[in-house]
Image (tube, coloured by chain):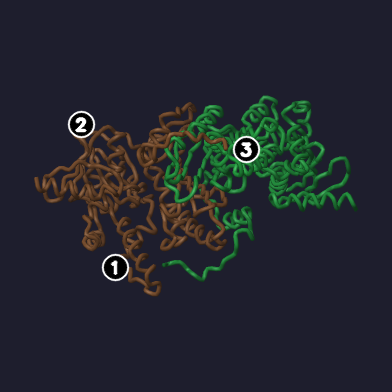
Chain colours: A green, B brown
Amino acid sequence: MFQDKDLQRTPLSEIGEFGMIDRIQSSFKNTQPTTQLGIGDDCAIIDYGEKAMLISTDMLTEGVHFNLAYVPLKHLGYKAIASSVSDVCAMNALPQQVLVSFAVSDRFPVEAIDELFAGMLIACQKYEVDLVGGDTTASKAGLVINVTAIGSCDKEKIVTRKGARENDLLVVSGDLGSAYFGLQILERENEVYKVNPNVQPDLRPYDYLIGRQLKPEARLDIIKLLEKLNVKPTAMIDVSDGLASEILHLSQQSKVGFTLDEEKIPLDQQVISAGEEFELNASIAALNGGEDYELLFTIKQEDYDKIKGNPHFTVIGFANDLQAGNHLVARGSNIKIPLTSQGWDAFYQYQKNVKNAEEE
Amino acid sequence: MFQDKDLQRTPLSEIGEFGMIDRIQSSFKNTQPTTQLGIGDDCAIIDYGEKAMLISTDMLTEGVHFNLAYVPLKHLGYKAIASSVSDVCAMNALPQQVLVSFAVSDRFPVEAIDELFAGMLIACQKYEVDLVGGDTTASKAGLVINVTAIGSCDKEKIVTRKGARENDLLVVSGDLGSAYFGLQILERENEVYKVNPNVQPDLRPYDYLIGRQLKPEARLDIIKLLEKLNVKPTAMIDVSDGLASEILHLSQQSKVGFTLDEEKIPLDQQVISAGEEFELNASIAALNGGEDYELLFTIKQEDYDKIKGNPHFTVIGFANDLQAGNHLVARGSNIKIPLTSQGWDAFYQYQKNVKNAEEE
């Protein structure tokens, strides 16, 4: 009864998630001396003398981030923790604590919550993080989970998205695109199941892809390995939204452009097979698919020898002048395609661009 | 397709929110040396050398915590921040940062989010906290907001729920019950409005009550005042769920019982009037209503002179032996009624108890 009915109505889709974040960020100013870094990186940084605290928060909503028709609650709990602590890793730090809020409707029995937290417990044990708080409430609709992850780090070890410089090498851990194809397969089999619930699909040929989608890992091991190799990245981000989007974040904040070599993007054999099966260029799954939770970072050229030949790392490109922009060098050619990030809708546009560039 | 269809189904209502928290807490063990205090207080405490970080997280869901038919988004934003930083105050500390996640459906235009964050901005400025991070996502259902609040404090100044001792005085700031009646009035007028949208209600006689419901304040001023008066409470909690429930939390964690004097419960004149109008004992609104965000704390008897006569504080009872239990001494009598907390359903049972006790 108090609402202003004359409110203008600009659809959220018109400005998008990042537009909304920019809009919020521009009206808030930081005033606390302990706020070292606010909105705009994987974590905020809070100053505690010699140590800094790193903190990040992530919300997962049913029907948007997960479909309970084929995502087991235990896996969901694991993934909620893994994806959240991954943000702390992306600052070159190790997570230490998490807080978990969740909202559930009546249709969730106690045993379902038990399953969810059983998965969270396994992740907390694996990553050695403590569950130190949270909130539980009713939901009029589906399940909502919010995880806040906290890490601590010596200040001089922190890596943000800002430090990449021209000629730095662009490196990624593990391989990419598998979580995306894992999701495609689960969606497809769920459609089959809805038609005939008695058919149990044979998912063995896709086990790696499905595992990467349902139970991704935060790469704490990579943070430890980098420390051991005495490599401090100049900039870093985790690959949650797809390689293209993350490269553009690093570019924007570090004020450099990137040249990405499509040929070098690390792809598992199952990703390549799935690409053929789904008639989708596997590189596109890596570029725009997301949810791989690998670490994407830049290193100084002089550090190259320290990671050379290490199976955990692939050099996929390098930083160039910001004016030169961000490009993908297409496989088996010298054709440079501007790198864009418009979510999954962009797939088809991108494929068209490649085709056009080849035909020119 | 992977879900276990044979899962046992115990309704959540059978164990309740606190039962669920106990269940989760019992399976998780803290292992990080920086975790000073985990689940079970208003905030978790993380050790950063001389300083400690206090952190709390709260989730608000549409249709459960707020009804957008009569809660303006700007007020909702303010309240989300206020209620969350109140948890930091309850540890005797001042908040410094917040992180805000929210999920919205398509029906929310950009301008609605602007309103929500305009309210958050006013609260952040008033409480001098920085918005340092968050997450924004789509929701298949209503609006969901999660606020994580962070504070910092010298370790020796922290007050938990655990420190109350026998003979300590039980003190509350401000007055109680008004937020509850504010909600009753808004709900009532919303029903009237649904029948005839052209009638604009005259809410002036209830301005204080409605203000307390729609725009509650976190009592940072009380934390500063206690510091100035050189009073360190022995235990503290904020009144979010109603006085009875909070007293029982202090009792459980401090291992003392409490005797609460009904006559002493501070009630605004509008609360008393509303009690008559709604035919509900105003004390019951204070005991079980919640959302007042006042601070409830215990002090040593020797500190009494420091707060005596201060209009911000009311001594409402004292701590006794745990074995003696928790009791309310009913107004104008010496009748002791066991203090229980079962949410708002308990109202009527409680009224019956009082009546029975009087008739005995």
Q: SS class of the residue under badge 1?
A: helix
On whether disc 2 and disc 3 are found on a single subunit, the reply is no
Residue placed under numbered mark 2 in the picture? B323
* Residue at 28% in and 48% down: B345
> Quick one: B156 or A12, which is closer to the camera?
A12
Q: Quadrant of residue A155?
A: top right
If the image is split into quadrants, where does the N terminus of chain A sit?
A: bottom left
| Callout 3 amino acid | Met
Residue A327 at what x, y percent from top left?
80, 47
Q: Type of residue at label 1?
A: Pro
Front position among marks 1 and 3: 1
Any part of residue A127 in sight: yes
| Mark number, residue B205 | 1
| Residue placed furthest toward the left | B360
Q: Are marks 1 and 3 on the same chain?
A: no
- Amino acid under disc 2: Gln
> Label 3 near label 1: C-beta < 8 Å?
no
**Callout 1: chain:** B
Q: Is residue B236 above or below residue B219?
A: above
C-alpha separation, residue under disc 2 versus residue under disc 3: 51 Å
Rounded to the nearest whole Å, what is the CA distance between mark 2 and mark 1?
44 Å
Residue underneath mark 3: A91
In the rendered structure, the answer to whether residue A88 lies left or right of residue A204 reads left
Residue sitting at x 69%, y 27% = A230
Q: Are marks 2 and 3 in contact (CB under 8 Å)?
A: no
Residue A156 is at least partly visible in this image: no
